[in-house]
Image (cartoon, rainbow, N blue to C red):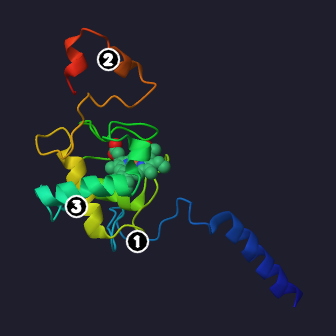
Amino acid sequence: MRVRFALLFTGLIACALGCNGSGPAVAAGASPAVPTNVGPVPGASAPPAEIANPYGNDPVATMDGRRLFLWYNCYGCHGGHAGGGMGPSLRKKDFLFGHHDDQIFDSIAEGRSEGMPAWGTKIPSDQIWQLVAYIQSLRTPQEPDPPTEPANEQVPNPENNNRIAIGTQSAHQEK
Ligand code: HEC
């Protein structure tokens, strides 16, 4: 009994020292150190196919999107013509979260961390696509109800202050 206990004990000690697998001992015949992937590998391997807006730039969908933009109070944060307010301008080329149709859809449906609510459970997806159509039409000739003044709602923003400087050409240009 005492001997078995002692053996067990030495076994435990030996294990504590060597059984964690980090030692240099590698069994002969162990598989080579080349990693082989098993199952789905996290991380993007190929970019996912972009999903295009089923409405495209359909003018009716674009007008509906304009109406929804006001209806759902998007303008409260993004400005009446989406030129920015508490939320960022949507009239710019560089979108924080991407300007592809599906990326804009995701911004609206899933929300974004710095204050953009998730609308996916409140707005049916066809209406979200109409909003996407409207946002994509901004600054194009297709934009419904375009601003008569340059959208300059993002205050305070020193860049905008420059743009409203009286007598400058840029006052009438929408960048
Ligand atoms: C409560 C204020 C608020 C409301 C209401 C709101 N947004 Fe936003 N939105 C934001 C903020 C803030 C951001 C930036 C989020 C960030 O940077 O994480 C944003 C980001 C976005 C973006 C991504 C912009 C980019 O640069 O990638 C889109 C698109 C957008 N909003 C569309 C909408 C639409 C459409 C509605 C109406 C259905 C709406 N938002 C309503 C505050 C709002």
Measuring from the top left, give residue 88's x and y in whole percent: 39, 39
Q: CA distance from mark 3 to mark 2?
A: 42 Å
Q: Callout 2, which amino acid?
A: Ile
Whether residue 51 is situated above or below residue 137 in the rendered picture: below
Residue drawn where x is 26% and y is 36% of the image: 92
Is residue 31 something that shows in the picture?
Answer: yes
Mark found first going from the N terminus, 1 or 3 = 1
User: Mark 1 — residue?
Assistant: 30
Q: CA distance from mark 2 to mark 1?
A: 72 Å
Instruction: Name the outermost residue toward the bottom.
Output: 1
Residue drawn where x is 42% and y is 24% of the image: 157
Neighbour class for label 2 at 10 Å: few (<14), some, many (≥20)? some
Q: Secondary structure at mark 1?
A: loop
Q: Is mark 3 within 8 Å of ligand 1?
A: no
Whether tag 2 and tag 1 are in contact, CB under 8 A, the answer is no
Q: Is mark 2 within 8 Å of ligand 1?
A: no
